[in-house]
Image (cartoon, helix red, strand yellow):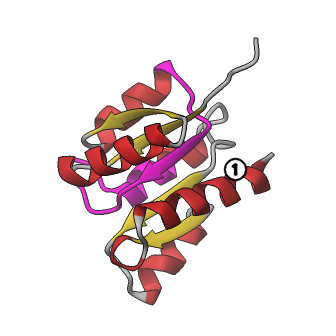
Amino acid sequence: MIKDKTSVLIIEDDSYISDMYKIKLESENFEVATAKDGIIGIKMLEKQKPDIILLDVVMPKMDGFDVLKIIKKNIELKGIPVVLLTNLGQKENVEKGFDLGADSYIIKAHFTPSEVIEKIREVLKKSM
């Protein structure tokens, strides 16, 4: 079966940001699911594997770095590209994200939604 839409899971606790990216991605013909925290995101990943994950770092219950560790340790999930989408721009956070296996690191304040979609497409191309 050939999928006609690329699927994205957005794990983000800020519903305004999550909704903004969901609307923008859907307008670009992506299929989008959202999770409001890391625990819900991991549960969703157990049921359905997206083509790419947009992952916030600062979240309640489980932060994005812990979610990323779980994803990259799971044999079924570790191949899914992960883009960290956060406002943590300190060098040590960026390095930590890449060390844990992130495919890209986007600082929210520095990118428009259109630029984020461009970055998602770049990451998807590299992962194929």
In the rendered image, residue 9, in percent from the top left (x then y), is placed at 45, 38
Q: Is residue 90 above or below residue 23?
A: below
Q: Residue furthest right?
A: 128
Residue 24: within the magenta? Answer: no
Q: Compare residues 64 and 15 and report the one nearer the observer.
A: 15
Q: Is residue 60 above or below residue 44?
A: below
Q: Which residues are magenta?
A: 47-69
Q: Residue furthest front?
A: 27
Q: Give the side of residue 88 with respect to residue 61, left or right.
A: right
Q: Secondary structure at mark 1?
A: helix
Residue 33 quadrant = top left
Residue appearing at x 65%, y 54% in the figure? 121
In the rendered image, residue 3, in percent from the top left (x then y), is placed at 69, 21
Q: Amino acid at mark 1?
A: Leu
Q: Looking at the figure, which quarter contains the C terminus?
A: top right
In the rendered image, residue 124, in percent from the top left (x then y), is placed at 69, 50
Q: Give the side of residue 87 with respect to residue 53, left or right.
A: left
Q: Is residue 91 above or below residue 76?
A: below
Q: Is residue 94 above or below residue 118?
A: below
Q: Residues within 10 Å of mark 1 (few under 14, many from 20)?
A: some
Residue appearing at x 46%, y 44% in the figure? 25
Q: Compare residues 58 and 121 and report the one nearer the observer.
A: 121
Q: Give the side of residue 94 with respect to residue 11, left or right.
A: right
Residue appearing at x 53%, y 56% in the figure? 117
Residue hosting label 1: 124
Residue 101 makes an appearance in the image: no
Q: Compare residues 27 and 91 and report the one nearer the observer.
A: 27
In the rendered image, residue 51, in percent from the top left (x then y), is placed at 62, 37
